[in-house]
Amino acid sequence: MGYEIELSFNLKKQTDVTNMINKAVELANNNYCDRHYQFSEMEGKVRGLKRQSLIMVFCFESEYINQMSDFLKEVLAKYKRKLYIESIYHIDCNSLIYASPYYMKIMEEHQVDNYKKKRQNLSFSDTDYYILKEVLKKIK
């Protein structure tokens, strides 16, 4: 199994959606992404949409953790204002490594509490920390 990374971008702000998707997929494939898929997410009423996003999920096998980390660094460097990291999930350990503020809003309350507790206690594995160090450095 491995890791899942959820990236999103605001469809209201992007003009060339197809190009953005193709570049992200190419970047992932260059870094040994195992599989990827996408879906859209909308929040609000039909005439007053608060959020209209495209979510892209990239899956990496555990053996390609260095390449996955490179993928995250490249995404953050090239698309910092366009693509947002919503979550990073370790499938094998059934563990949420990173959650964006928006992602925490849509999680159940007990999941948010568990995630915050884990972050406060810094109870991450060495591998999780390796992934997080670049992400948290660039997000702040």
Image (cartoon, grey):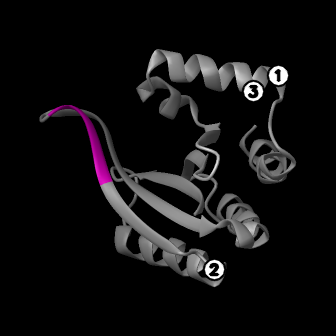
Please tell me which residue lies in front, 6 or 79.
Answer: 6
Q: Secondary structure at mark 3?
A: helix
The residue drawn where x is 49% and y is 31% is 102
Q: Position of residue 120 (x, y in %)?
A: 79, 20
Q: Secondary structure at mark 2?
A: loop
Q: Position of residue 83 (x, y in %)?
A: 54, 55
Amino acid at dot 1: Asn
Task: In the displayed orientation, state which residue is furthest to the left.
Answer: 46
Q: Position of residue 113 (x, y in %)?
A: 60, 16
CB atoms of marks 1 and 3 within 8 Å? yes
Q: Residues within 10 Å of mark 3 (few under 14, many from 20)?
A: few
Amino acid at dot 2: Tyr
Quadrant showing the N terminus: bottom right
Amino acid at dot 3: Arg
**Residue where numbered disc 2 is placed:** 32
Queried whether the magenta region covers residue 125, the answer comes back as no
The residue drawn where x is 12% and y is 35% is 46
Q: Residues within 10 Å of mark 2 (few under 14, many from 20)?
A: some
| Residue 83 visible, this orientation | no
Res. 119 mark: 3
Q: Secondary structure at mark 1?
A: helix
- Mark 2 or 3, nearer chain start: 2
**Residue where numbered disc 1 is placed:** 121
Q: Position of residue 80 (x, y in %)?
A: 64, 54
CA distance separating discs 2 and 3: 28 Å
In the displayed structure, does residue 137 sit left or right of residue 97?
right
Q: In the image, which residues are magenta?
A: 40-45
